[in-house]
Image: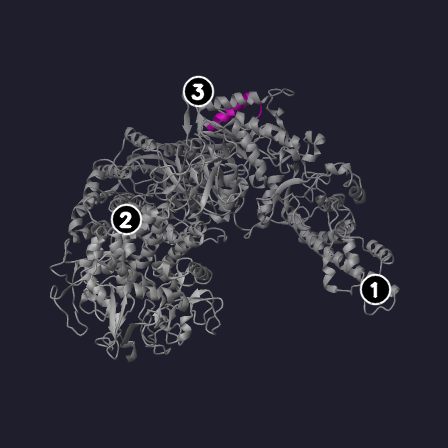
């Protein structure tokens, strides 16, 4: 009945009607290697990448069906497994903001340690973390949550009872929970500032499932059944017969190797005898009584189940049916409110009336009343359906006029309107047609005919109006009433049309059902019309309607009789939301009952629970007792019809069941077509395993794919790394070769496929199962409704020789052994279109079991011989052939089709003309499938197939060779040592690494391709075939990839392929270290470490490579942190990651050294080859392009001062000072040999850095008296040798100030093409000076660009060549700020008499002298800064298109550019906060936040500026001069380093203006993107710039020194404010 109809459902909704029956979601249709055939997949499925596909294949060519080579004793295996189990599994899971936590699944083992980390998106927020995981000693209550504590990565608590919140200042804080209880638990957080509204008001959440434990055996000596060891057989309880015969019938499962039995419900069944239509949930079926009239109690059943559990070691689960009850359930008579009926749900009355009409039509057809109109009793032709369709529309639907239940009585309203308007004052309004739509039909809640209403008072207001064509009141009355009538008629017509559309759809649906059942060739071709085979399925019970007319039935549905017009349950056709109850009232007028979208189960009515127990007290109590009874007797439950069960109901009842049995094993079957939706059910209900069906596969390739999908990790998969986030999972599977819902594979495929399909299923690394009858070769569906014959007993019709029983036992035992011995990795190889090989591998012992199955989805040739396929090749030695099995017919045609089957009248019997051929645990010499002599090629073994015929299964066990075994043992020891940070190997490594300084560590971790080449040792970045060069030659280049690859087990990634293909990568890592003298000991250690890895099977190398390289990487990182100041060493991981990234830029580069130093320089003296700072990677890594003046000193504090590298910073400061010329330091240093003096800002950044050095460094003031060997002591001097002209540093600074004060015009040396191919001649002319009124430094002209915004146009085609995009001549705002800070610094030095000078002086054109002290100069700047830079609200100039901002410059040649809003003024506010009025500064920063703040950087130009161009593309070859050749470099793209100064300025002025707390929170929120970038960029840095709204810019340096430095300075400022305390 219901399942016959279910088959029709599948046919009805199928896209391809010739496709085999599929119950599995099409989303599972990923592709395995070995075939090019592709299946269409729905859009919701995540596409599997090419690398993932390769992972399936190469993991085993990887493994190639290879295994280990040494026979390892069980003692060793169990010892190693035991050792592994002793280590607590630690898992890190991020929690994030958002509502989709239910759709993501994390599955963990009992006993695991869970760490919940905040995601980077929560940075800066204060959060409270709650969970319903109970405190120790407490019981789980779903709605009871407790606060969790937070702690730092070092274990220090950061929350308390008084302050349970955590301030998220990094992602390394966490909350730990030790998971000792089974179930699914909810963790959620809320922001501290939000009110506590419970879990429903969560700001973010995560669900974690802890797997239950099944225990079997006698009390005191129980054993555990691992979930992946489950072998479950389904039995239909009604076919077990009397209870005293159960033992012998259930023994069949035990003897076939099953360890779990699934029972359909054991309760009293309804009249249909369906296993799932229960008459009384609280009574055991009377069929189980030994004699007629006898009684059986639940306790009696429990005794049998207990014996299975304790004596046989077999657990049990039983269905619970929560959605419906049998029509005959007596308790419904007293509690009809428990159903969806015409009384409880009036919205179903139209659907019931339609159902009654269909029933009347069906009755007329059965009586032959419609034969004269072309509808005979036996409907078997399409023309009959056409005639039936006509009759339904014209003769039956017209009798019930369903649309009238939604319409209003128009004339009643018109008459009432006329009556009312006559008694009212004349209206003042004119008829307004636009208001007519305000009047809509209001549905009558009782759904009576023409009883819908309208807002009559509003109708009077709108329609009682003046009309221009009415000249007396009576005419106006009639006009108004007629207008209302027309409007109401249109509303009724609209309803009529809508309902008629639903009815048309409904008729098409019912005819589709009739067509399948009675007309289609692939349907059952039913002839009879009876209660069981009615023409139309009923959607409702029709109690008391026999003999009544449709008019009488309609009247009854409004009376008490309507309580028993109850809606049936069923399947919803097509796409419906499984998270919504389809029987509830839906938005709009239609529902599945009216549109006939339900495959109705006419024997059961749908139960109506409501939203809470109070809505239907009896029903909730009744079903709770039912579920609790089931949980008491059985070890688990199968939730029938799960996807249609209201979630809140299932939650409540399963919680009740778990109170009885906390280790309840919950199984369910879902048809949601979405992993995400499946996860909602799994998370909310705590479902342990979802049923998956092998029979849904349409060929062997798809079946192999399912084995892989529901199996474990890939062979050679990466080891768990607690420092990396746990990857989300799909639901655990109970994978069955046949479910009780489906027909026998003998009908769908061939009898010869039963054994190979069972073999493939048994190799899945998950729970597996089957249906009783499969192993006995029952060739038909054992129907849950129709079948009444009983199962046969063990020894009486069924024994070890029946069907494939012997082979199934061997396969089941093998499946259990694989799970219990830790064979958790899987590889599937499509050896032939019909041959699939599955490898199960143990990552602890590296033994493998390989099963080869020759499927037979169709019948082979009756005399089929062996199939020729490639040999089975594996790495290792053959231990044994575990089994060889095949099924053949007992005749001279071994693969003939079975003869017509004869059913036994009393018992369920199977095919008997077949013979099972089975050998177990045999040597190769006794094989009938393989050639008896193996071919050995080095470490590889090859077995040739000689007799692999259809239906054959062969399984072998292989082990590792003794040589690789010794290497493997060394690797295991090393891996453990690195993981636990203890032991001999770790101590050796630690000893080596502890001697390394930051320069050596930079070489070990970083060094980009160009830097490696610059060493001159022939090195370069490692080039991974089919991927490209890694970004760093050091370990970071590999680890950046591994952190992405390993959590996803992406063994098909080119990096893994390269590791498997050869030893090049390992040799490269060790060999390149020899280029660094200090790294040679580490190189030797790495060589020795990699050596045993070269001797193990190649498929294992990626996982051990990851473990070792990541382990060494962590040791190096720890050493980096140890060498850092306390701010970093004891800081959070965000700070430490930025500090680590500074090492990228600071290295010794042969082609980019500092100029030679004076021999008289104070100690410590610089080395011959100094560390220099790269502006960014990879573009500015070597040669003359490496060292930029401004970049170096913008980045110096963040990269060197804050990281404690003062000596190296001192050398850089002095080295650049040695090149001073024209009062400037060079833009490009070029080792001091060919410096270019075309920037006005580097000198001020240099002097500002000296100020910071003096203030920050230990004995920092001593640098002022360091000897600076001037290369160009005079502007026109040739280069001087080191020591030829020494000058004290403060004198060099004084000269720079003096030159600016005096003013200077100069032309660049070697001006022309030699130094700049694009600049026009005027651009080489430079002018610097100081404004006599304001004191502002100025310089430049309209043809050059002397600040950091230095893009020079270069496109002849677009006409921008030689035209700077941003000249910024005049007084650039940030230079004025730097100038002021430097002058105040000099003033302080003078006042303390640390320098001899007190100011500057200059001579005028006539020889007059002007003297300014540092203080006078600084005061002059301060007094004029706001006056000339701040654009107030009262500014009236036409160029001031933005108010309340600081200008970008003052005195520019192009005056309008002064008024542009850019990202430079926050620099001035940060370096010289006392320059400006705090309120003005705050207003300007607010404008910057509004207009130019981006996700990762600052827009370089106001988006409202006419010249704003957000996206930088240096290759743009258009004729657009604003963007050609990247002319818009600084005209909108979002640069990262300025955001650091913006954030720091906001913190400074927020404190001054009283906005500090909110600004700190805002700062952290902005830094989220930077933290995310640091965590995900392969470069592990921050980029130079991004395009619009943070989008990727392909021409940007991927990591830039000043970007990293600026953000590190922000974190330091937060730290100084105490704002980084979690």
Q: Nearer the viewer, residue 158 or 1591?
A: 158
Q: Is residue 196 magenta?
A: no
**Which mark identifies residue 219?**
3
Give the foreground label among 3 and 1.
1
Q: Are marks 2 and 3 in contact (CB under 8 Å)?
A: no
Marks 3/1: CA–CA distance = 90 Å
Q: CA distance from mark 2 to mark 3?
A: 49 Å
Cβ–Cβ under 8 Å for marks 2 and 1: no
Q: Residue 84 appears at what percent x and percent y?
A: 32, 33
Residue 1353 placement: quadrant = bottom left
Counting from the top left corner in percent of width and height, residue 1604 is at: 32, 56
Q: Nearer the viewer, residue 1068 or 171?
A: 171
Q: Quadrant of residue 860?
A: top left
The tag earlier along the polypeptide, 3 or 1, is: 3
Return the mark for residue 1130: none
Q: Please name whichever residue, 795 or 1133, is drawn nearer the observer in this view of the structure.
A: 1133
Mark 2 vs mark 3: which is more N-terminal? 3
Mark 3, secondary structure of its residue: loop
Q: Mark 1 = which residue?
A: 479
Q: Residue at x 32, y 45 (%)?
A: 1131
Mark nearest the camera among 2 and 1 is 1
Please give left or right for residue 1513 compared with residue 937 in the image.
Answer: right
Q: In this rendering, does residue 1515 appear at all?
A: no
- Characterize the local packing of mark 3: few (<14), some (14-19) or many (20 or more) Cα atoms within 10 angstroms: few
What percent of the width, then of the height, locates residue 1383?
29, 62
Report the disc number at residue 1060.
2
Cα separation, mark 2 vs mark 1, equals 89 Å
* First of labels 2, 1 by sequence position: 1
Kindly indicate the quadrant of the structure image that contains residue 1603.
bottom left
Secondary structure of the residue carrying tag 1 is helix
Q: Quadrant of the C terminus?
A: top left
The stretch in magenta equals 241-253
């Amino acid at each position: 009945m219901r399942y016959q109809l279910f088959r029709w459902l599948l046919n009805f909704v199928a896209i391809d009607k010739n496709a085999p029956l599929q119950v599995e979601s099409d989303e599972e249709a990923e592709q395995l290697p070995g075939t090019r055939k592709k299946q269409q997949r729905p859009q919701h499925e995540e596409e599997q990448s090419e690398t993932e596909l390769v992972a399936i294949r190469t993991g085993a060519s990887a493994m190639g069906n290879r295994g280990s080579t040494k026979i390892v004793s069980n003692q060793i295996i169990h010892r190693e497994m035991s050792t592994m189990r002793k280590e607590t599994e630690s898992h890190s899971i991020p929690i994030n903001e958002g509502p989709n936590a239910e759709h993501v699944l994390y599955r963990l083992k009992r006993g695991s340690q869970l760490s919940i980390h905040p995601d980077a998106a929560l940075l800066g927020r204060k959060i409270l973390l709650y969970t319903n995981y109970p405190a120790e000693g407490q019981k789980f209550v779903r709605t009871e949550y407790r606060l969790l504590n937070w702690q730092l990565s070092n274990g220090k608590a950061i929350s308390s009872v008084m302050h349970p919140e955590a301030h998220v200042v990094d992602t390394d804080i966490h909350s730990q929970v030790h998971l000792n209880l089974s179930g699914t638990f909810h963790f959620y957080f809320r922001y501290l500032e939000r009110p506590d509204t419970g879990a429903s008001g969560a700001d973010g959440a995560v669900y974690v499932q802890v797997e239950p434990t099944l225990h079997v055996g006698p009390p005191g000596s129980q054993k555990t059944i691992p979930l992946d060891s489950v072998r479950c057989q389904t039995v239909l309880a009604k076919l077990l017969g009397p209870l005293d015969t159960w033992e012998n019938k259930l023994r069949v499962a035990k003897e076939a190797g099953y360890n779990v039995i699934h029972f359909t419900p054991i309760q009293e069944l309804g009249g249909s005898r369906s296993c799932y239509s229960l008459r009384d949930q609280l009574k055991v079926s009377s069929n189980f009584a030994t004699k007629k009239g006898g009684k059986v109690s639940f306790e009696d059943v429990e005794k049998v189940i207990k014996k299975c559990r304790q004596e046989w070691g077999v657990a049990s689960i039983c269905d619970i049916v929560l959605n419906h009850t049998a029509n005959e359930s007596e308790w419904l008579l007293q509690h009809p409110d428990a159903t969806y009926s015409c009384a409880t749900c009036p919205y179903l009355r139209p659907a019931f009336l339609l159902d009654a009409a269909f029933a009347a039509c069906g009755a007329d057809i059965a009586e032959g009343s419609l034969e004269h109109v072309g509808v005979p009793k036996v409907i078997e032709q399409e023309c009959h359906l056409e005639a039936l369709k006509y009759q339904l529309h014209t003769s039956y639907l017209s009798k019930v006029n369903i649309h009238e239940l939604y319409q209003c009585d128009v004339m009643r309203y018109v008459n009432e309107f006329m009556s009312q308007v006559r008694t009212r004052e004349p209206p003042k309004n004119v008829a307004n047609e636009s208001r007519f739509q305000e009047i809509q039909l209001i549905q009558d809640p009782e759904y009576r005919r023409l009883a819908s209403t309208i807002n009559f008072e509003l109708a009077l207001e709108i329609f009682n109006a003046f009309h221009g064509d009415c000249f007396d009141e009576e005419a106006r009355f009639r006009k108004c009433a007629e207008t209302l009538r027309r409007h109401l008629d249109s509303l009724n017509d609209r309803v009529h049309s809508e309902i008629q559309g639903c009815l048309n759809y409904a008729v098409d649906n019912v005819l589709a059902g009739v067509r399948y059942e009675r007309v289609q060739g692939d349907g059952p071709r039913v002839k009879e019309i009876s209660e069981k085979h009615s023409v139309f399925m009923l959607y409702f019970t029709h109690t008391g309607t026999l003999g009544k007319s449709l008019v009488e039935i309609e009247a009854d549905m409004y009376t008490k009789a309507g309580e028993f017009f109850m809606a049936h349950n069923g399947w919803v056709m097509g796409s419906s939301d499984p998270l919504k109850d389809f029987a509830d009232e839906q938005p709009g007028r239609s529902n599945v009952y009216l549109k006939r979208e339900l495959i109705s189960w006419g024997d059961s009515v749908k139960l109506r629970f409501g939203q809470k127990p109070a809505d239907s007290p009896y029903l909730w109590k009744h079903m709770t007792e039912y579920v609790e009874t089931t949980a008491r007797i059985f070890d688990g439950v199968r939730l029938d019809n799960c996807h249609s069960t209201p979630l809140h109901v299932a939650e409540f009842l399963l919680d009740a069941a778990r109170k009885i049995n906390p280790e309840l094993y919950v199984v369910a079957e879902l048809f949601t077509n979405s992993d995400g939706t499946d996860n909602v059910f799994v998370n909310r209900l705590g479902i342990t395993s979802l049923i998956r069906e092998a029979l849904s596969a349409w060929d062997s390739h798809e079946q192999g794919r399912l084995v892989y999908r529901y199996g474990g990790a890939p062979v050679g998969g990466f080891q768990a790394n607690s420092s990396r986030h746990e990857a989300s999972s799909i639901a655990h599977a109970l994978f069955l070769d046949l479910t009780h819902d489906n027909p026998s594979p003998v009908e769908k495929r061939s009898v010869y496929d039963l054994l190979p399909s069972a073999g493939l299923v048994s190799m899945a690394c998950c729970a597996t199962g089957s249906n009783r009858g499969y192993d006995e070769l029952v060739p038909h569906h054992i129907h849950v409704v129709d079948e009444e014959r009983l199962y046969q007993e063990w020894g009486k019709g069924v024994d070890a020789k029946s069907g494939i029983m012997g082979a199934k036992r061997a396969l089941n035992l093998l499946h259990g052994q694989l799970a219990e011995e830790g064979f958790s990795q899987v590889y599937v190889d499509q050896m032939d279109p019909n041959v699939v090989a599955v490898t199960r591998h143990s990552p602890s012992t590296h033994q493998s079991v390989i099963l080869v199955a020759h499927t037979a989805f169709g019948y082979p040739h009756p005399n089929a011989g062996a199939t020729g396929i490639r040999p089975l090749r594996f790495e290792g030695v053959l231990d044994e052939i575990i089994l060889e099995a095949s099924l053949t017919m007992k005749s001279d045609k071994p693969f003939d089709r079975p003869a017509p089957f004869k059913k036994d009248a009393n018992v369920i019997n199977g095919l008997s003309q077949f013979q099972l051929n089975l050998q177990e645990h045999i040597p190769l010499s006794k094989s009938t499938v393989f050639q008896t002599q193996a071919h050995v090629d080095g470490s590889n073994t090859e077995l040739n197939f000689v007799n692999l015929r259809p239906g054959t299964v062969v399984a072998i066990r292989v082990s590792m060779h003794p040589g690789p075994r010794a290497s493997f043992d060394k690797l295991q020891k090393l891996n453990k040592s690195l993981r636990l940070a203890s032991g001999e190997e770790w101590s050796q490594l630690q000893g080596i690494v502890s001697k390394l300084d930051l320069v050596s560590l930079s070489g070990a971790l970083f060094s980009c391709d160009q830097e490696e080449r610059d060493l001159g040792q022939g090195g370069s970045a490692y080039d991974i075939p089919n991927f490209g060069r890694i970004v760093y030659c050091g370990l970071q280049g590999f680890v950046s990839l591994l952190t992405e690859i390993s959590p996803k087990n992406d063994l098909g990634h080119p990096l893994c392929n390269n590791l498997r293909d050869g030893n090049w990568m390992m040799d490269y890592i060790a060999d390149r270290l020899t280029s660094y003298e200090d790294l040679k000991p580490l190189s030797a250690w790495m060589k020795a470490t990699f050596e045993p890895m070269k001797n193990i099977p190649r498929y294992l190398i990626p996982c051990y490579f990851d473990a070792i390289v990541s382990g060494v990487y962590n040791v190096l990182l720890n050493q980096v942190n140890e060498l850092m100041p306390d701010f970093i060493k004891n800081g959070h991981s965000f700070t430490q990651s930025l500090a680590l990234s500074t090492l990228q830029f600071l290295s010794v580069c042969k082609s980019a050294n500092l100029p030679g130093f004076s021999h008289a320089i104070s100690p410590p003296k610089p080395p011959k080859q100094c560390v220099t700072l790269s502006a960014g990677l990879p573009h500015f890594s070597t040669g003359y392009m490496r060292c930029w003046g401004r970049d170096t000193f913008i980045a110096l504090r963040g990269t060197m001062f804050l990281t404690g590298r003062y000596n190296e910073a001192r050398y850089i400061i002095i080295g650049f000072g040695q090149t001073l010329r024209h009062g400037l330091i060079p833009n490009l240093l070029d080792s001091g040999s060919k410096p270019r003096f075309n920037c006005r800002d580097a000198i001020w950044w240099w002097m500002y850095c000296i100020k910071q050095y003096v203030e920050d460094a230990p004995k920092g003031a001593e640098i002022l008296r360091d000897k600076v060997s001037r290369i160009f002591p005079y502007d026109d001097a040739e280069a001087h040798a080191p020591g030829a002209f020494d000058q004290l540093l403060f004198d060099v600074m004084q000269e720079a100030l003096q030159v600016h004060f005096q003013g200077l015009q100069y032309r660049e040396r070697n001006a022309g093409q030699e130094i700049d191919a694009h600049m026009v001649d005027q651009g080489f002319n430079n002018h610097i000076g100081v404004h006599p009124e304001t004191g502002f430094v100025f310089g430049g002209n309209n043809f050059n660009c002397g600040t950091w915004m230095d893009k020079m146009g270069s496109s002849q085609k677009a006409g921008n060549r030689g035209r700077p995009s941003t000249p910024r001549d005049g007084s650039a705002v940030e230079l004025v700020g730097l100038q002021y800070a430097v002058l105040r610094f000099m003033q302080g030095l003078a006042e303390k008499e640390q320098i001899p000078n007190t100011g500057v002086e200059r001579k005028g054109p006539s020889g007059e002298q002007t003297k300014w002290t540092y203080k006078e100069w600084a005061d002059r700047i301060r007094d004029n800064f706001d006056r000339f830079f701040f654009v107030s609200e009262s500014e009236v100039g036409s160029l001031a298109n933005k108010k309340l901002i600081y200008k970008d410059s003052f005195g520019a040649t192009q005056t309008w550019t002064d008024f542009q809003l850019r990202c430079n003024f926050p620099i001035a506010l940060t370096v010289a906060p006392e320059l400006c009025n705090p309120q003005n500064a705050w207003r300007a920063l607010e404008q910057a936040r509004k207009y130019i703040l981006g996700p990762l950087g600052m827009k370089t130009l106001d988006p409202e500026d006419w010249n704003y161009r957000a996206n930088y593309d240096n290759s743009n070859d258009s004729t657009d001069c604003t963007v050609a050749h990247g002319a818009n470099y600084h005209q909108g793209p979002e640069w990262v380093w300025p955001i650091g100064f913006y954030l720091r300025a906001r913190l400074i002025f927020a404190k001054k203006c009283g906005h500090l707390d909110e600004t700190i929170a805002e700062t952290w929120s902005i830094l989220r993107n930077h933290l995310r970038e640091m965590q995900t960029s392969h470069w592990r840095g921050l980029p130079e710039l991004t395009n619009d709204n943070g989008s990727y810019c392909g021409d940007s340096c991927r990591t830039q020194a000043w970007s990293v430095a600026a953000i590190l300075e922000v974190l330091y400022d937060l730290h100084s404010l105490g704002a980084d305390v979690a």
